[in-house]
Every structure is written in structure tokens, then in C-alpha cells.
Amino acid sequence: MKKYENDAEFMALVGHLIDHPRFQKLDGIVQHHHSTRMEHSINVAYTSFKIARKFGWDKKSTARGGLLHDFFYYDWRVTKFNKSHAWVHPRIAIRNARKLTDLNKKEEDIILKHMWGATLAFPRYKESYIVTMVDKYWAVKEATIPMRRHLAKPIRYSRKFLGSHNR
């Protein structure tokens, strides 16, 4: 069982969305090379939820907006639009999210503006900032998994190499 699944409060807020067949389809789509879009969305939602809970902010909107921020089905590496993926995919995600559940203004803002930095869409709520920053954290973490494994290996230098650089 994954850690988030043991958090009853988190699951009460978003468990029904995670279990929905439309959301489950994200599990078959690669997101940041080494994670699925579903895994990424849950990582962002759960981390953001824990931060909002710690600060006493709106954890429900944070969890729901975080979960649905990348709720689209196309492969952004292949499918191209007239506008950038950073601008297009939040609008597709919000359209798909509205088909799944009713959204409040904060959840809409979280989804639409989570690409702030890559776009000029400035977040309106502190919860939107949480998801924006956590999304970037997880994107880097997920994309660099192989690099971290490689860097974690001990580095061995030969005496010949070390000796030639100590002169």
C-alpha cells in the first residue's frame, strides 16, 4: 500500500477521483520519462495536501487541484498545438476535470495557473503557489531518477589518474 493510501483524510478528499476510470487512464501515460501521469498527479496532490494541512490552509482544494492539474491524455512530446504545451494543457485539464467533478474557484486557479514560470498566468491563491512549486519539484525528481541512481554509485579513481592531477 502506498503512503498516501494510508492517509484517511487525503483519501476522503480525493480517493473517489483517484478511483474514477477516467483518472485511472492516466496510469498508462508516461509523464516525466520515469513516472506515469497518474503517479505524478498523486505525488503532486499528496505533497501539496500535506503542506496545506501543516499551514492550516485549504487542504481540500489543494489536494483536488493538485490531483487534476495534469488531467489530459495526449503525449505532450508528440502532439503539438499552435500555442505552447505549458499554456494549452491546463485548459484541457480543467475541461476534463469539470466532466469528472464540480470545481471551486480555487481549484480552477490551481489547475489553470500551475505552469506559472513557464507562462505568465500568475496564481491568485497561496494554495495555487503550493501546487505550482510542488509540481516543479516532482517533475525534476521524477525526470532525474536514473541520474540520481548513477550519481549515488561510489566513484573510484585510479592512482594513476589521481597522481597525474596532484603534480
Image (cartoon, rainbow, N blue to C red):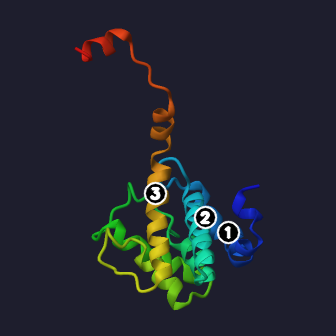
Q: CA distance from mark 1 to mark 2?
A: 8 Å
The tag on residue 18 is 1
Viewer-proximal residue among 42 and 18:
42
Q: Position of residue 96 (x, y in %)?
A: 53, 77
Mark 2, residue position: 42
Q: Is residue 38 above or below residue 123?
A: above
Q: Quadrant of residue 13?
A: bottom right
Q: Residues within 10 Å of mark 1 (few under 14, many from 20)?
A: some
Q: Position of residue 49 (x, y in %)?
A: 61, 73
Residue 1 appears left or right of 60: right
The tag on residue 56 is none
Circles 3, 1 touching at the beta carbon (< 8 Å):
no
Q: Residues within 10 Å of mark 3 (few under 14, many from 20)?
A: some
Q: Secondary structure at mark 1?
A: helix
Q: Amino acid at mark 2?
A: Ile
Q: Is residue 133 above or below residue 144?
A: below
Circles 1, 2 touching at the beta carbon (< 8 Å):
yes
Mark toward the viewer: 3 or 1: 3
Q: CA distance from mark 3 to mark 2?
A: 12 Å
Q: Secondary structure at mark 3?
A: helix
Q: Amino acid at mark 3?
A: Ala
Mark toward the viewer: 1 or 2: 2
Q: Amino acid at mark 1?
A: Ile
Residue drawn at the location 59% of the way across and 84% of the way down: 58
Residue furthest bottom as drawn: 105
Residue 122 appears left or right of 94: left
Residue 143 appears left or right of 164: right
Q: Quadrant of residue 37?
A: bottom right
Going from N to C along the chain, the mark reached first, 3 or 1, is 1
Mark 3, residue position: 139
Residue drawn at the location 50% of the way across and 72% of the way down: 69
